[in-house]
Amino acid sequence: MTRRQSTASCVGILLLVAGATLASQARPAPPAPPPPETPPAVSQVLQTYTDITGELRAQMAAGGRETPRMRELEQRLASETRSAGAALLDAVRRADERTAEAAAYALKYSTTPESAVTALLATLDRFDGALVNNAGLSLEQLVATHPQLRIPMAPLIAELRTTEWNRQQKIAQVLEVLADQGRVTDEGGRLSAVLIPMLASQRERVFAPARAILAKVTRQQLGIAPEPWIAWHAQKYRSRIELAAGIYELVQIVQPQMMGNEERFRMEREIFTTRATLLGGLARDAETARVLGRRFGVVVQVPDSGFPQDRLSSLTSAVRTRLPMASIVISPITDEFVPFTTAAGNLRRLIGR
């Protein structure tokens, strides 16, 4: 895989109860309809998707290189997607979260790409955005393999406004393909206004596509720093962009490695020889993020040589136990990040702390 890779509303329930008549309250409520039965073809897609996510964990522990089994599973999923047909379109809209997640991932192989795009765009806000990762992967592949597809910009731009890096990344990758095809414009500066704050992200997977799209749609070559882009946008569109809004999280990168039978952890310029001291360092940085009013995230970067999967799993569990509010991601060593101390310094400068 490359870089380019049901909860009811309480408000709705309360409004429904408040709007009920006395007569309707006197009658017993009708039984809730049973959940839709999952067609066998969709169940098979779900099983293969479960196998893929399991293999992905093994693949990341091995340094991120695609495995022969992953290629085999993807080929199997493509065949199963063709067999499932329209049932996957219904699943991504109506099924439970895990089934809808599998359907969203599988639809990149859909033989009815127009219908798949419509279904995927309609599900971006399901489960509080939990389907965006897989929907974005599928949209990216669909627009790359079917350049004639028409994709409305409004729902994509709306996703870029979120403060979730993974949602921004996946949708920016879709837009990057569209920009390469010459099918993206910056009408009224609306797209550039959401891309420029993304330049301040620590994550290459966020700032790199934003940088590429900006250069293509504006025909400007203003470099990699966000400040010249902010000045350009202010002059052209008479609008102000708050760069600090693009730094909604602070992320620390941990690079584990094995030295014989012993673990070592690099975090910027520090080397930790025990998990206890590593967790102490992470707790220190989490406090910095809290003081600066930002969420804290941890990225565990696995070296090319890999890191034992059982140790990787126990390491992420230990971090989650010590820092339950932190997000945790496993990443290959090839991903690039702005260092935590640099990002924190930039944020202090922007907010005057």
Image (cartoon, grey):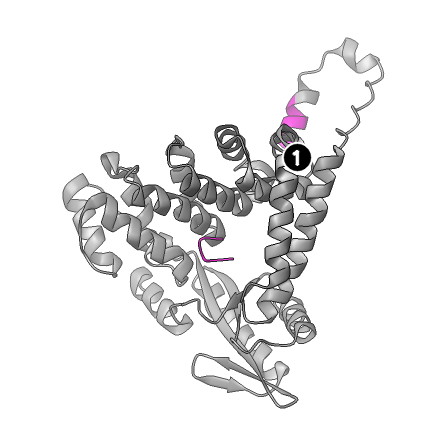
The residue to which callout 1 is attached is 83
Q: Residue at x 63, y 46 (%)?
A: 77
Apparent side of residue 193 relative to residue 12 in the rendered image (left or right): left
Residue 139 pos. (x, y %) = 47, 40
Apparent side of residue 216 relative to residue 122 in the rendered image (left or right): left
Q: Residue at x 41, y 43 (%)?
A: 144
Query: Would you say the magenta stretch is mainly helix, strand or loop?
Result: loop
Secondary element at tag 1 = helix
Residue 188 pos. (x, y %) = 23, 34
Q: Is residue 258 above or below residue 180?
A: below
Residue 106 pos. (x, y %) = 59, 42
State which quarter of the image contains the C terminus.
bottom left
Residue 193 pos. (x, y %) = 29, 44
The amino acid at mark 1 is: Ser
Q: Is residue 336 above or below residue 267?
A: above
Q: Nearer the viewer, residue 98 or 245?
A: 98
Asked which quadrant contains residue 239, the reply is top left
Q: Nearer the viewer, residue 221 or 265?
A: 221
Residue 5 falls within the magenta-colored stretch:
yes
| Neighbours of disc 1 within 10 Å: few (<14), some (14-19), many (20+) | some
Q: What range is drawn magenta here?
A: 1-15
Q: Is residue 323 above or below residue 80?
A: below
* Name of the residue lying farthest toward the left: 235
Is residue 161 visible in the rendered image? The answer is no
Is residue 94 visible in the rendered image? The answer is yes
Q: Residue at x 34, y 59 (%)?
A: 200
Q: Is residue 84 above or below residue 348?
A: above
Residue 36 falls within the magenta-colored stretch:
no
* Name of the residue lying farthest toward the right: 28
Apparent side of residue 183 relative to residue 308 in the rendered image (left or right): left
